[in-house]
Amino acid sequence: MSSSDGNLHVALLPSSGMGHLLPYLRLAASLIHHQLSLTLITTHPIVSSAESQLISTFLSAFPQITQKKFTPIPLDSVAANITDPFQLQWETIRQSAHLLSPLISSSSPPLSFIITDVTLMSSVISVTAKLCLPNYILFTSSARMLSLFSCFPSIPSSIPKESLPPILLDSNSSFTKNFSDNSGSLKHFNGVLINSFEELEKEPLKMLASGNLTKGLPPVFPLGHFLPLELERISLLAPLKWLENQEESSVVYVSFGSRTAISKEQIRELGNGLVLSGCKFLWVVKSKVVDKEEEEGLDEILGHQLMKKIENNGLVVKEWVDQWQILSQKAVGGFISHCGWNSVVEAAWHGIPVLGWPQQGDQMINAEVIEAGGWGLCMKSWVKWQSKAQTLVRVVRICRDLNCGRGRVFGRIAFIAVADITDAIAVITGIAVVNFTLFIVYCGY
Ligand code: G50
């Protein structure tokens, strides 16, 4: 990706969801420093308010970046049989990919290459190939997930079958069909950009670079960690003020990402568990998949009683938060996370131990990156939200007890490998005697 005239013009084509948009914008900002001209292709209407706001703040902060608006032909969610609005948007863009052709060819100066989101690969490559435009992928998940993706439908021996995204077990789903088509189109791309780095994913990156995994895999460029942008900073007066008054490493940060909605009943169960754990916590609550639909206030979602109980121990917020800023606070000593890839990388960068509770998609595979690195503990099966408050009490206490200090993730090992979370709980608390398949508790540095 170098040029002698230094006058490259690059187009960026993200798909939808904050998890896909954020790494794109972070990458764009770092490319700007290399004297490139950039065009950001934005798809309208935009699904969530968080995305709309971020795009407009970004474009005002970087007036040198050209915006090209792309309006695909709308798809009906019932006819397409897709309920998730973000996935529906991926499919909408895919089916209208041919309309990108005039938009791409009219770019001035002519484009040098395009960077396409992983979800759009197979539909966009046919357009760019006709235009002889080099095409790179931005892979928005882990290198470990990329190793599965590149072989699909085979499964590399390093990945347990149980960790597979459950949706991929349904070979009739449109997601699986796209995933498979995208994987098949890999060899036609010029390279794969990924938000990972060697210290985080040594083995998977080595395997991808070895050429033994898949025939024709283009070069993989681990460009991480993508740094957050100044403009992502949103004023978090209340949480920051509260965190400033807490002791070092005493607070568990709880967030399940921007796309996971949970029912009111389960939210309350979680809340009660957090209160009972006795740990301090900062909790981001989400009750709807798309933020525009969040109508109820915290009082209504949590109920007055629970709100009252939380007052002493924790702080609850409902808006999109600047997670980077939260993880940077000394008071935060643990993270209960759904293991979306951006969250995993941000926790690693800050040296925060993670208690992973994967819910769907690539999250279980990302969670395994944490365990392989020895800086956290994860649910080993797809445990959904039916868990009782009492389970969470124990889970949160583990997180607190696991907390061996910040900023030392790669320098020390706090490693616990157990059959599942119940075993781990027993190890830490000594409450019950269970049959361990294996456990090591080591915490020295
Ligand atoms: C969501 C999901 C399942 C899943 C993934 C999700 C990923 C991410 C990368 O994000 O693996 C990816 C997504 C779509 C695609 C190819 C790669 O077509 O529910 O596996």
Image (tube, helix red, strand yellow):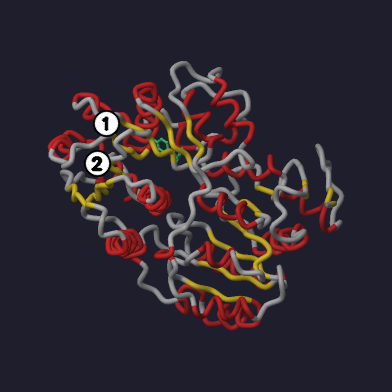
Circle 2 packing at 10 Å, graded few (<14), some (14-19), many (20+), is: many
In the image, 317 versus 247, the foreground residue is: 247
What residue sits 66% from the left and 57% below the top?
Answer: 352
| Farthest residue, direction front | 5
Earlier sequence position, callout 2 versus callout 1: 2
**Quadrant of the picture in which ligand 1 is shown:** top left
- Number of dots carrying numbers: 2
Q: Quick one: SS at disc 1?
A: helix
Which residue carries the number 2 mark?
93
Whole-percent x, y for residue 12 in the image: 30, 44
Circle number at residue 179: none
User: How far across and down, in percent of the image, does residue 358 sit?
Assistant: 57, 48
Say what amino acid the circle numbered 1 marks: Ser
From the top left corner, tell me how far across and down residue 114 is, in percent: 29, 37
List x then y, in percent, for residue 375. Answer: 70, 49
Instruction: Judge by depth and name the residue closer to the eye, 335 or 435.
Output: 335
Do tag 2 and tag 1 residues touch (Cβ < 8 Å)?
Answer: yes
Q: Residue at x 57, y 39 (%)?
A: 365
Q: Amino acid at mark 2?
A: Ile
Crowding around mark 1 (Cα neighbors within 10 Å: few <14, some 14 to 19, many 20+) is many
Callout 2 secondary element: helix
Residue corresponding to mark 1: 123
Q: CA distance from mark 2 to mark 1?
A: 9 Å
Ligand 1 under 8 Å from disc 1 Cβ: no
**Residue 368 visible here:** no
